[in-house]
Image (tube, helix red, strand yellow):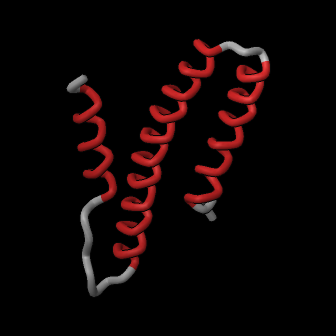
Amino acid sequence: MPRQRQQILDNLDAVYREAYDRAEAAKDARLMADLDAAYQREQLLLEVLLDIRDALTTTAASRSAPSSPGPDPVGALETIRRITRLR
């Protein structure tokens, strides 16, 4: 069973909080700013990945129910692959 969304986000917060506290204790303002920006970027990316996971999980669950055919998970992965190639 996948970990809960909030647990994953809390783990991310704990990792960055520890590093931020160390930078704050060292009075390293530049590192604190870098960590803050990195945290926001990582949180956004993680939320997108969790949304994808949730969508694929929902799709897989709906596929197991014969009365409600859903989108193809392989097709969803192909779409994600195409999107990432556009970068």
In this rendering, is residue 57 above or below 49? below
Which residue occupies 25% across, 23% down? 87
Most extreme residue toward the bottom is: 67
Image position of 63 (left or right of 36): left
Q: Quadrant of residue 18?
A: top right
Which residue occupies 35% across, 73% down? 63
Image location of residue 84, percent across then percent down: 29, 31
Q: Quadrant of residue 51?
A: bottom left
Image location of residue 20, percent across then percent down: 68, 28
Quadrant of image for the N terminus = bottom right
- Nearer to us in this view, 24 or 73: 24
Q: Quadrant of residue 61?
A: bottom left
Image location of residue 49, percent across then percent down: 44, 46
- Nearer to us in this view, 4 or 81: 4
In this rendering, is residue 28 above or below 67? above
Image position of 33 (left or right of 57): right
Image position of 82 (left or right of 8): left
In this rendering, is residue 24 above or below 3? above
Which residue occupies 27% across, 87% down? 67
In this rendering, is residue 7 above or below 17? below
